[in-house]
Amino acid sequence: MKSLVILLFLSSFLFNLHQINCLLKFSLESTNENVKWTLENRNKSINIPGSVPGGVYTDLQNAGIIGDILSGYNDVLTRWVAHDTWTYTSKFNVSANSLSSAVARLVLEGVDTVAYIELNGIPIGLTKNMFVRYVFDVKAYLKEGENKLTFNFESPIDYAKNRSRQHFAAPECVPDVYNGECHANQIRKMQSSFSWDWGPAFPSVGIWRNIRLEFFNGAVIWSVTTHTEKKDTIWFLSVKVYLETGKNIRNISGYLSVYLSVEGHSTIKIGKNVDTKTNSDGTFDVELEMNISENMIREWWPNGYGSQHLYNLLVFFTTNGDRSDREISHKHMKIGFRTIELVEQEASLILGNDTLAGQGLTFYFKVNGHPLFMKGSNWIPSNVLPENNENEKTRIDNLLTAARATHMAMLRVWGGGVYESDYFYRRCDELGILIWQDFMFACAMYPVDPEFLDNVRAEIQHNVLRLQHHPSIAVWAGNNENEVALRGNWYSTQAQFEKYKAEYIRLYVDNIKPIVESIDPKRRYLISSPSNGRKSEEDGYIAKNPYDPHFGDTHYYNYLADNWDLNIFPQTRFASEYGFQSLPSLKTMKTATNKTSDYRIDSDYSKHRQHSPNGYNFIELQMKRHMKLNKDDPKYFEKFIYYSQISQAMSIKAETEFYRQSQADWYTMGALYWQLNDVWQAPSWSGIEYGGKWKMLHYFAKEFFAPVLVSPRLTLAKNVDVYLLNDRFVPIINANITVEMFKWNSFTPIKSQIFLANAKPLSSEKQFSIDLWDADKKDEIFLRFSLQADGVLSSPKNYIFPVPLKNIKGLRTPNIKVDVSETTAVCGNATSFTVNLNVDTIVPFLWLEANSIDGHFHDNGFIITEPKTSVHFCTKEKINAQQLKRGITYRYYEN
């Protein structure tokens, strides 16, 4: 309703000002039928239609010159594309009326990456950073009638290689198993486009974001930042408006007005007369402040803690002059009112002076005055081609709503990808997903020559200005793993440690930090992740131990230990990365290859897709600790996939619950596992496969991230410590935790006991410890934990398996009956079905597939301990219950 009111207001405002000139924008994108683009390679053997926004791989696919880049070995077979040079050319008409404007400029929101631009055969500029908005004054080069615009792209591989010869920074290349390219750190481009341990190399070129011509006489708004602060019962809103004009215009006068929609369908307006000189580059800024009573707005909360109230903010700049000469520029955005603070204070204030945990500093996010445990994951680009990552709104929606559905409140936008689209951050605002925003530097040292630093400064300024107003942005981080890489000598830099340390400080501290803090002083800027946070800074920015558990955040991977065991994980204040690999489903894999000979772990295809050194060995090692898998089994490959997903889900469940439990005694306050999504059909750490299919991990996340959870830990002493996790603002009082012991062959518990439990708001508390009643027969039993509490509508059951599954006794082959009925009001616009499962014995890790039917189960990977279980299935396909029943297959763990 508020959006409708503000849009009606905007329409009325502009209608009333119909005699005032407005900025004229002329789109140069492919959607404009008056603009045609062509793509040509160096020797002109390829000349095809081009797409803008777009990229060379997309256009070559559309023209049929190359096949699906994600099929087979095409990441390597199409590498010639990245070694060639490419030219995008367009022709368009410009009217005499447009040319009469004082300012005519070409605005490029994103060019990937190194391009030499010509207009009507005259060079007008160079781009060399895909993350920067470029603006070129083109008034002197445009002509009435037809104009020709050309982008000559240099090979990103060659550009990076040539720069490395002059400004080398370690490492030279990625590991051979990545099948990638070298020197990604030399080019300001999506670093993972040169390959990563979870993805292929597609070093694309193209105009990947919007492009347009602008004609005007006055000034235009290009960015707005907002700062909110609450004191007593008043919210203080500071609005800073960044404007641009032509370099030939030295003075601007006009009126700036700001309109904020608030509760009660009301609007608050402030305004300011402007008469100012412009900077040498034609920019200037104006700041306004607004005071708002707290009863006129409602706070914005992260997912799981409250609603996401957003308010329309409209900004207008009207130049002075006669009515017919005046111009108006406007910008519309939505903002949220919330406070957020990354608290790094003496840990002893919370944990006491007499404990090891009480040493060091805390590291937690306080939102609207409350310390919140951050549950979430890490986000990589949603597509390996940046133009598709930008434009696939459905894919972004599906991934973000999947994160919300599993109680996630934070995603970390990882530093080897891209600064995501405006749409991405807007949806995070709407869904309540806080963003830990890395800057795009990852797993490398970086050069610090003047050209590179100038490039980086423009990048940081542009993206902080673009993203700052979003309430979802929680924290900025300078890089991914570069502090720990230098300290840990990952790239054989020890002999030049002091040199690389000085360069590290020059880049992230001397150049990036001041820009961030000047534009966005209220948000924390961390130099690196992981780091010791404030302690790393006090120690000269390169800590002796960046993994110190008493400070900051950590990344933890251990593929050799038993990852199902909660006792193996180190303490941390905040776990911002941890993970374990699994394979994608056969259904997803078949979208990349249909050769049955590829469906083996030792096939060339499988080896090609596994970019993590020794990856399959680590997966197999973990599986064999707990499950039986016979290589002579004719369905070995299918079982390997399924067991790998069980192992991944159980590993991340164990580690996540350890971190949530550790809020009680270490004040661990965050768990962001690696990683949410995938870019191709290959082994990776993701919980969601490329294409959107949930792995078992993502289903498990719905439970291990549940707001209220009974979380047991089998200790080294073989006792069970039981925690109650409560991520709500209300306490749990006089609840009952039921502990039941089952044998593997019966639904009837052989023992049961009820324990009284209480938990404070926003807490993790150890409730009690129990011993295993039948310790001498622990291979025959398992434990089930459940909660009954007033005011708790649902809390998942949890389990302890005293011995590895491969050693259990009594597990029987189940008889499983599946029935399906259509239901309503569960799936929104999709068709909803209820799948009823009837079984006659315990079934571990029951996994349902709908095979060719495109849809989604609400739950999966069940530990079946009751004869009847129901689950909802949603699909947009036009099918009936019988068709779904025929399409459902299942598998389960068996010894």
Image (tube, rainbow, N blue to C red):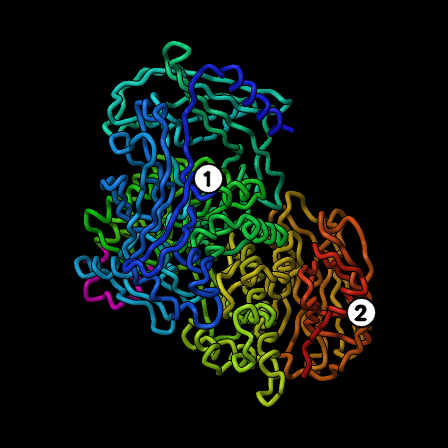
Q: Are marks 2 and 1 in contact (CB under 8 Å)?
A: no
Secondary structure at badge 1 equals loop
For this orientation, the residue located farthest to the left is 166
745 and 601: which one is in front?
601
On residue 32, the disc is 1
Query: Alpha carbon of mark 2 to alpha carbon of mark 1: how far?
Result: 52 Å
Sequence-wise, the earlier of marks 2 and 1 is 1
Residue 469 location, x and y as percent?
A: 46, 35
Name above or below for residue 528 compared with residue 328. Answer: below
On residue 47, the disc is none
Start and end of the magenta stretch?
A: 484-501
What amino acid is at disc 2? Val
Drawn side of residue 507 relative to residue 404, left or right: left
Secondary structure at badge 2 equals strand
Q: Main secondary structure of the magenta part?
A: helix
Q: Residue at x 73, y 81 (%)?
A: 811
Residue 139 location, x and y as percent?
A: 28, 30
Name above or below for residue 266 compared with residue 830. Answer: above
For this orientation, the residue located farthest to the top is 322
Q: Residue at x 70, y 66 (%)?
A: 850
Q: Nearer the viewer, mark 2 or mark 1?
A: 1
Residue 489 belongs to the span the image colors magenta: yes
Residue 751 location, x and y as percent?
A: 79, 72
Q: Quadrant of residue 318?
A: top left
On residue 818, the disc is 2
Q: Residue at x 51, y 42 (%)?
A: 423
